[in-house]
Image (tube, rainbow, N blue to C red):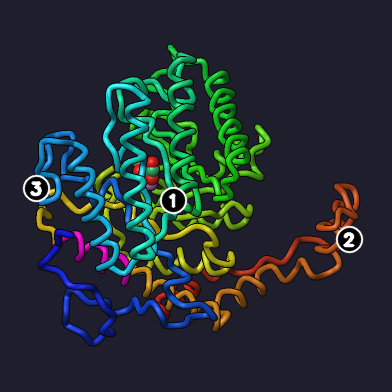
Amino acid sequence: MTEYFPEVNSIVYEGPESTNTLAFKHYNPDQVVLGKTMAEHLRFSVCYWHTLKGLGGDPFGPGTIIRNYNQHEDPMTVADKTLEAAFELFTKLGVGFWCFHDRDIAPEADNLTETNKRLDIIVEKAKKLQDQTGVKLLWGTTNAFSHRRFMAGAGTNPSPEVFAYAASQIKKALEVTHYLGGEGYVFWGGREGYDTLLNTDMGREMDNMARLLQMAVDYKKKIGFTGQFYIEPKPKEPTKHQYDFDAGNCHAFLQKYGLDKDFKLNIEANHATLAGHTFQHELAYCAANNILGSVDANRGDMLIGWDTDQFPTNIYDATLAMYIILKAGGLATGGLNFDAKVRRQSIDPVDLFYAHVGAMDTFARGLKNAARMIEDKTFDKLVAERYSGWAGELGRNIESGKVGFEQLEQYIIENGEPRINSGRQELCENLLNDYI
Ligand code: XUL
Ligand code: CO
């Protein structure tokens, strides 16, 4: 097979003292942290759309990046070579997983039947490459947002014909994800929202979105696919308002339509910040509600208000994210998928490797820091102390539902002004710095 990245060898762990810019300084896949290897905790995944297909285009200009695997007239030859390049990259990086949209791996043809045939050809090859390399599919998904037919949404489209097309596409994407042994399947509502309410029936659109998801749940059972379903929240972009706004919004939606047992969430760092939350907040909301599924590990730029999808390099964020993930019992079927793209000026193949090595080391550091925070119980002790009143008689009576307004009023009349305690935020922040 052709080698597409001859300038890069397999990346290995060399430790924190290494000066090799293409070696891991912190990610040591076999190193055991809190009873599991780093590879088991972190479950790194490369995303196909940015890493293999992204060429640096932005709203102001086309791509700047030229790859050796896409220089061909025939789109199926390009798809074939891209897949080979992908598995070389996965293996050289030593990641265990990959993720794709149906249209990333195989190009559309003139009609759905022909498109599905093309997809089958590439999927067959992907299956062989997975078997040869041991790289697994973390999740599959459908691109029901790029084609012009989806300009007004897929499941929320005003036209039932477009809804039917989206359903057919998801059906096929579920089949191939199942065939490839995918551990999950993501629903990201790229255009499931609106640009103006003046032309939008919001209630109907949300009902129809739920109907599409229910059909997916039914079909999943029918074909025996046991992978986890995820919804990926994002508040805006490409539409002005998207229905899957944030974790709380998705949770309410799933509960309203009785879908909450069938879905968990795929939290993306840059989507969290677009929604006005921190990455940690969105993860913590999911953990508190038992819907933490998987993670799109990236970051935004605080000075640019859009989805820049940068590779994660912030050790504070990674530490706080891993702290929540570890305390929630880990990612189970999920993983850390690098939904991130190299910058427009990072035009060399080696930049893809620098990007992933840095991101993997960032999360390895986050994992090690978070493990120490947990072992030392530093923040557990602070939180336990802060809430210790709930172990007393009054707290127990409130939490067990034994008392109501009248008894509580009586309590205050008898006992007077409540005691208040310092929140110790500065201490907490100083203690966190000790772990970074
Ligand atoms: C878009 C985004 C998607 C999903 C998969 O912002 O994050 O790539 O992760 O459709
Ligand atoms: Co994403």
First in sequence: mark 1 vs mark 3: 3
Quadrant assignment, res 18: bottom left
Q: List the residue tagged with mark 2.
A: 414
Callout 1 secondary element: loop
Whether disc 3's CB lies below 8 Å from ligand 1 is answered no
Quadrant assignment, res 1: bottom left
**Residue stretch in magenta:** 350-361
Residue 214 sits inside the magenta stretch: no
Q: Amino acid at mark 1?
A: Leu
Q: List the residue tagged with mark 3.
A: 66
Q: Residues within 10 Å of mark 3 (few under 14, many from 20)?
A: some
Task: Name the residue: 52% across, 64% down.
Answer: 325
First in sequence: mark 3 vs mark 2: 3
Residues at discs 3 and 2 in contact (Cβ within 8 Å) = no
Q: CA distance from mark 3 to mark 2?
A: 76 Å
Task: Name the residue: 59% across, 27% down.
Answer: 211
Q: Amino acid at mark 3?
A: Ile
Residue 180 tag number = 1
Residues at discs 1 and 3 in contact (Cβ within 8 Å) = no
Main secondary-structure element of the magenta-colored stretch:
helix
Q: Position of residue 357 (x, y in %)?
A: 26, 68
| Position above or below: 300 against 389 | above
